[in-house]
Structures are given as structure tokens and as C-alpha cells.
Image (spheres, rainbow, N blue to C red):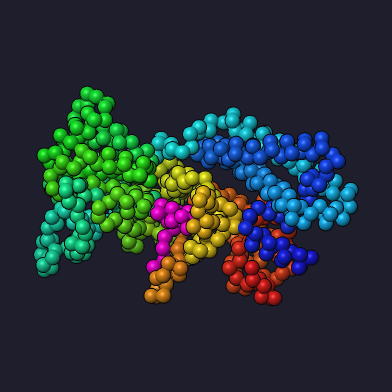
Amino acid sequence: MEGELMSTIKTAVSTTTGIISGFNDWVGFFQWLRPDNNQESKQQHEELWKLQTTLPLMQVMIDRAEWSIHKEGVPILLQELKDVSYDTEDLIEEFKYFKLKSEMDGPQSLLKRSLDFIKNDILSSFDKVKLLQQRAEHLMSQMNDLDLQQETPHFDRSARPETSSFPDSKVFGRQKEIVALKVLLGVPVPIPSGSKRKKGHPAAAEATAQKDCMDYPVNGDVSVLAIVGIGGVGKTTLAQQICQDQHVKGYFDQILWTCVSDDFDTKRITKELVHSCGEDIASDNLDYLQNKLAKVVGLNRFLVVLDDVWDDSLKDNGQEWQKFCAPLTTGVQGSMILMTTRSSKVAKLVCTLSPFQLQGLEEDTFWEFFKACALDGKRSTMDIKLASIGRMIVPKLKGSPLAAKTLGRLLRMKIDTVHWSNILNSELWELKQEVGDILPALTLSYLYLPRHLRRCLALCAMFPKDHKFKKTVLVDLWSAQCFVEQDKMCMHTAGDWCFEELESRCFFQEVVASSASAVSSRNRKYVMHDLIHDMIQLVSGNECFVIRNETDLSNVPEKVRHISLFTSKGFDHQKLLALTRCKKLRSILSMEQLGKGKFSL
């Protein structure tokens, strides 16, 4: 039994299809070998074809449900429908597998088995086809009765509040970032009073050195600078501070702000910029609007701020972006476009200056911000015990202001050590979030991805938090599960493209190399931010499970699809038999040796 289990585990990991649905649930699909029962064979093929055509409908419904995950009743139905869709994929792939096997081995080798046993297997298998069809139709009927979002490719703008150039009343830290950005924008930075530094503010000196190395545009093209960072790190707030800075307002004749969001519509954006100038609009014609904007900015040094720019700005091979920029080439020298974006890809392709990478708040500043969020004015100080717990919570937030806001709202519900200790020992993905907090923001970033990239990203829930991984390992996992869309590319090239897409959207962060040998692309390692990991766990549900010790074996969900083993102590092979109850398991990832026999997957 032990040998059979380990053999099956190896097969589940190494198979290139990745669609094996369990250890002991394989059955024979030999209807191709029964020409004596044409009527039954025809009926069975019709039922299988019907299930195959239902699968894309299930996937569309899943997309709609994911966009409506905040609505009552949707999460449970969504997980059930995902389970049915995965079971359907498994069953269809099993049909394909045994059909291919029968064609390669020939019918005689298969007919040696008992005909009665074959018949029972076939009936059992097609009972599954009927059952899956019934479950799918029932669930989709229930979900059709819910108010699900109809168009999934676009953001629900109501769930992503509009921004403005007016900042929050109190902003913690960012003084160095503000000075550096002012220099990059060309704004003169005065030497602080009493400073002995000839070059003024140290942040200004550093930014000036960076600025001197940049190639500025010529022939009237406007300079473009991007603030790039993960959702919730404070890009919009920093841009707001820049717009309200007195030196910035004194340097630029006009400051125009618009929130772009995922829909990069040149007409809409141009119209909003004209409106922000206080100009009346007599026509909705794009040519009129662009001429109006060109006239407004033509005699001024302007700063245009485009908040929350997404990959949609790159559509039509960049022609949409060029069309938008056309009326902005008439401004006075020194005019700038400042954008905020999560996408390093956007920054690389449309910006003329090196992107400004925004990191989390510094430790001391973040602690003060965290206290303000957690206490909310109810108290001015924490007692020793609360402060001790708070100090242990803060590192988990990685300097993200929105993460502090999210946890702060929960912590201030009950300011005592018991409540705070419970929060310290819980997972962030278990928290209920409000619109505008970090997990909803990250979930929107996730939902914007194409379906195959969402599945690729969700599979990363197989990794523990802060796990450092190589690109090749993740691409191999995706390829084994057939998650990547090949088109005309080979599997690994397509996998590399998927990885680069996710990295450009800040889901993966490159780990700073500790030695020169780690600089090569093959040796580079990556990590997911804790908040990204929490979001992935939230959307993947029970699909992935991480086993850290043998006691976790009893907690593995029965419907789990992917398991990873992360332990330095190894596992007793006999205890791994507990996994036989996971009939829907597709893959096992082991980063350590298994058991006393030093067996490694």
C-alpha cells in the first residue's frame, strides 16, 4: 500500500497534464472498445459532449461570481461551482487519457480484464458525467438568481473610489520621498536653514544625481515620470502631497489631476483635464477637447497627474497613449506628466524618466501611523502590554499604510490585550474588509488579470508566507497544470510570459541578491508580499494547503487540489497515507525529503 501511494504521488506531480483527480479514483473508460452497443455509446458521447460544452459556461459564471464576491451568498456558491468545474476538467482529461491509451496499446490488451468489471466501470464513470451536469446546471441556476456582475473584463468603478489632488489631513512620513520627487520634477529645492551642506537636502542631492543621469525628451515631447508601487503603499497620497506642496505650486503654472483607473479612454481623460482647469466645454468631440486642452496648457508650465494607470493605457500598441499626449506637447519647457501605477510594465513603456519606486513607510514612522489607526483618538498612548502586542503586529504589515488602516479598524473595535492577541495570532485573510482597504484593492488587481493568469497566481498559495522561490520552479508548476496559454509559443516560453506579467503588476518582488552569483536570471529569487499572499489564500479557498508538520496532515481539506510539504524534519511514509482521503488531489510539491527513506519528489 505504501509503495502504491508513493508511486501515485510521483505521478500526480510529474504528469504534464496535471489533471489526475486522485489516488484511487481512476476508472476505465472503454466505450471506444464496445462497437456492439452503438446506441449506448452514442448516448454516452452525447452526454460527455454536453458536459464539455457546459464547462466554458461554468468558467464564465465563475468569473462573474468572483467580481461579485462581496455579495451575500456568492462565496459559498462560487466555491461549489469551482469544485464542479475542476471535477469536470478531471473527468474529461481521464476520458482523453484512456482513449489515448486504448489507441496506443490496442483493444486486445484491455479486453483481458473481466467484461463485467469493464461494464461496471463504464456505468460508474458515466454516472459521474450525469451527476456533474446536474450539479453544474443547479448551481448556475442558483447563481443566475443573484445580482452578479455582467461584464467581467472591467473594474466596478464604484468599488474603487475616485481620488483627487487634495490629500488626507495628516500624512505620516514621506518627507524624503517628497523632496526627491520635487527634484525629479525639476522643482527647485531650497537649502534648509542652517544647513552646512552645499548641495542642500541629502534626499535632494541623491535625486539630483539620479536626475542628471536621465535622458530627457526632445522635440517638444513632454516628460513622463511614474510613481510605481504595490496597491496600498501610498502612491496616491504621495502624489496628492506633491500637488499641495507650495514649491510645486509655485513652480508649475497649472496642476491638473484625473483618476484614470482601468479604462484608459482618451476622450474621458481629456475632458476631465479640461474641467479641472475650470474651462467650459461646449462639445464632446475629441478634436474639440484636445484643441481646448492644448490652448489651456500651451502658454504654461504644467503638471498633469494621472492617478491609477493600468495596462489599458498600452492598448492599440501604444497608439491610445500617443493620442492622449498629443495636445500636451505644446506646453512650456519643464512641463511634466506624473502618474501613479502598480504596473512596472506601464512605467517602462510610457515614461521618459526612470520610475520612482515607492516602498513602505520607515519603521518608526509606520509605528506612529499604526498607533493612530489602532487608537483612533480614543487614547493617546498604549499601555505596555498593548504596545508589546502592537510591536509584533507591525512587522506583518510590511510598512503598508492601507494594511495599517485595515488592521487598525479591527483592533480599535476592542482595545484590550485579549482581542489584540487574537488578531496577532490570526491570518489577515480571515479579516472582514471594507471597500478601500488593502485586500479589496488587491483583489481588484487580481480580478483584472485574464483567467489563466488568475489561476497561475492562485496556485502560489502552495507556498508559505515569505517563501523565496525561483522563476523556473513556478513556471514548471504552471506548465504541469496546463495553466499557461501557449498560443504559438512553447510551454515554458508561455510560462515565462505569465511570470513576467505577474511580476510587472507587483505580485512578485525580486529578492535583493546577497552575492554576485545570485545576479543571473537563473538564480534570481522572488517573494510575495504578505498581503498579496493573504489575498491569494482568500481567492483560492481550499484549493491549496501547506503542510508544515505531521499534525497538519489531519487538517487537510478533503477537496484540496494542491498540497505542498515544507518541513526540515521529514515525514513518516505511513503517516502520508492520510492523504489517500484527498480524492481530488492534483499535485504535491515537496521542498524537503520525505521520511526516513530519504525519498524526495
Residue at 66% of width from left, 40% of height from top? Answer: 52
- Which residue occupies the extreme top position in the image? 282
Which of the pair 450/246 is nearer the observer? Answer: 450
* Residue 229 horizontal/vertical position (percent): 35, 54
Q: Position of residue 403 (x, y in %)?
A: 41, 52
Q: Quadrant of the N terminus?
A: bottom right
> Percent x, y for residue 488?
50, 51
Q: Quadrant of the C terminus?
A: bottom right
Please tell me whether residue 496 belongs to the stretch shown in magenta: yes
Is residue 171 something one can see in this rendering? Answer: no
Q: How many marks?
A: 0
Residue drawn at x 15%, y 41% is: 330
For the point 40% across and 36% down, which residue is it? 157
Residue 324 on the magenta span = no
Query: Residue at position x 24%, y 41% from top?
Result: 325
Give whichever of 155, 392 is nearer the camera: 155
Q: Is residue 397 left or right of residue 57?
A: left
Residue 9 visible, this orientation: yes
User: Would residue 515 be found to the left or right of residue 462 on screen?
Assistant: left
Q: Nearer the viewer, residue 424 or 598?
A: 598
Q: Is residue 356 above or below residue 598?
A: above
Pick the residue in front: 311 or 322. Answer: 322
From which residue to which does the magenta span run?
Answer: 494-512
